[in-house]
Image (cartoon, coloured by chain):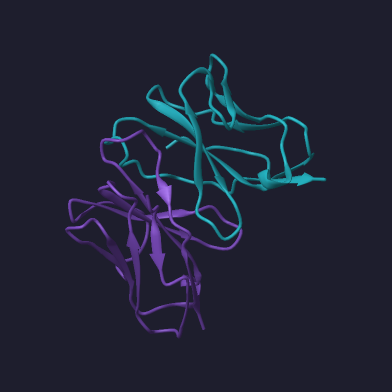
Chain colours: A purple, B cyan
Amino acid sequence: DAGVTQSPTHLIKTRGQQVTLRCSPKSGHDTVSWYQQALGQGPQFIFQYYEEEERQRGNFPDRFSGHQFPNYSSELNVNALLLGDSALYLCASSLEAGTLYEQYFGPGTRLTVT
Amino acid sequence: LAKTTQPISMDSYEGQEVNITCSHNNIATNDYITWYQQFPSQGPRFIIQGYKTKVTNEVASLFIPADRKSSTLSLPRVSLSDTAVYYCLVGDSNSGAGSYQLTFGKGTKLSVIP
């Protein structure tokens, strides 16, 4: 049973560019959340998708957007990249009807903005 | 969301029991307490969750006193592979199960020494 997978593993972009990160949830999961983790900090919630709609959103600007597909996979898009967007981006999947607060995280995508 | 306070770091020798205490003075009636573990360059992993008294699984125990203003994660006989960051999270159960927006602090960096 494959867990949460993310691609790419690493990415280097230039300021002002746009980036798309991808996530495939754990088999059977229907909810996908995205987190940003800066070096030395805990993960910060970006947003969550369920039934192909953004259901919750953290304190992130509109430059951060996402999408969930019918197969529950998801994308995170970041426009007009800033140096401060350099971080580990984590995708987590869960069952809407599953155990409270138990989310399964992928290995993350390391984004470096130069 | 209730704020949590944890020690920034802890050291322990192999084979010892490790107790990490988390303070959450403003915990609400509906709040659950959840602990996650994160290894370097990996996503966090759910360890244990509780509401009151004591919860034990194959990995750890969670002790919650009657006033619920703190909780203690206990790791029995740690090994080098337990070196990681441990996060304490507190949140309510009113959102859909599995849909909860996880709020991470900086966590406790546990270093296990040979």
Which residue is at 41% across, 47% downward?
A: A104
Q: Picture coordinates of residue B10 (x, y %)?
A: 74, 42
**Quadrant that contains the N terminus of chain B:** top left
Nearer-the-camera pick, B75 or A41: B75
**Among all residues in the image, which is located at the extreme front?**
A1
Q: Is residue A57 above or below residue B22?
A: below
Which residue is at 30% across, 42% downward?
A: B99
Q: Picture coordinates of residue A80 (x, y %)?
A: 36, 80
State which quadrant residue A7 falls in: bottom left
Q: Is residue B113 left or right of residue B86?
A: right
Q: How many marks?
A: 0
State which quadrant residue A47 falls in: bottom left
Q: Is residue A32 above or below residue B75?
A: below
**Quadrant that contains the C terminus of chain B:** top right
Q: Picture coordinates of residue A22 (x, y %)?
A: 34, 67
Q: Picture coordinates of residue B9 (x, y %)?
A: 71, 45
Which residue is at 57% across, 61% downward?
A: B41
State which quadrant residue A40 falls in: bottom right
**Among all residues in the image, which is located at the extreme top?**
B66
Q: Is residue B80 left or right of residue A66?
A: right
Q: Is residue B86 above or below residue A89?
A: above
